[in-house]
Image (tube, rainbow, N blue to C red):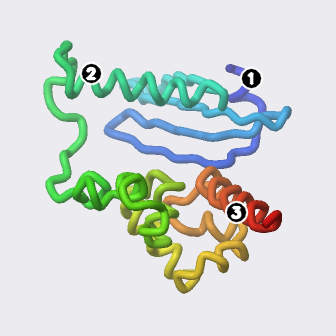
Amino acid sequence: MENARKINYPNLVSESFGHGRKHYFIDVKKAANDTHFVLVTSSEQYADKQYHRQTIQLWEEDLAFFVEALTMVLRQMTCGDGPRPFSKPQMEVVKDAAGMKALATEDRPREKLHAFGAGSLSNAELLAILFCTGSSELSVLDLCGKIMRSVKDDPARLTLRTTEDLCRFRGVGVAKAATLLAALELGRRAFATV
């Protein structure tokens, strides 16, 4: 892992946040063999002005397992019967949720699709199913609505968008852009054989 920090692998996506003397950096990088990995680095400044850094590296094939395990641990800590190591909430609870949880279950895109079929969903709702998450400022439905408005709610015009075009929307990175472009290509291939 020390090599991952020393070798200058290209960054695909980066995010950072901090609280007090602690800062965290999340970088998605592309390795020389065209695989991807995530570096999560914590950095803390001590009283003597020295920084202490710790980094973990997750390869793309392990990332889904890590996210699932972390989700289960956090769920147990916040909702389960086990010990709750946090004495106070670490994040502020949003009282007026603007995300999917704010919608009635029957109005959520996935549930609506299962109940009434894909034809009952708007273009933004179909896109929201592909994207799964929004951004820190927009729910997934708001983000997808913004994208669909940019193409005048015409899904065919999405095929003219490139990864770079899609990544200009805050909350859309290369993974969401790839998901959309792959779905569009799959649809194109399906109708090319009809």
Above or below, comparing residue 114 to residue 41 in the picture: below
Q: Of all residues shown, which one is farthest toward the top?
A: 82
Q: Of all residues shown, which one is farthest toward the front?
A: 194
Above or below, comparing residue 65 to residue 177 in the picture: above
Residue type at tag 1 = Asn
Residue beneath the point at 71% across and 72% down: 159
Q: Earlier in the sequence, mark 1 or mark 3?
A: 1
Residue type at tag 3 = Gly
For disc 3, the neighbor class at 10 Å (few under 14, some 14 to 19, many from 20) is few
Residue beneath the point at 58% across and 47% down: 14
Q: Is residue 57 left or right of residue 109?
A: right
Residue beneath the point at 26% across and 52% down: 101
For disc 1, the neighbor class at 10 Å (few under 14, some 14 to 19, many from 20) is few
Name the mark on residue 3.
1
Please provide percent x and percent y for residue 72: 36, 24
What separation in Å lies between label 1 and label 2 (alpha carbons)? 35 Å
Residue type at tag 2 = Gln
Residue beneath the point at 29% across and 27% down: 75
What separation in Å lies between label 1 and label 3 (alpha carbons)? 41 Å
* Residue annotated with mark 2: 76
* Residue annotated with mark 3: 187
Nearer the observer, disc 2 or disc 3?
3
Nearer the observer, disc 1 or disc 2?
2
Q: Secondary structure at mark 1?
A: helix
Please provide percent x and percent y for residue 157: 66, 79
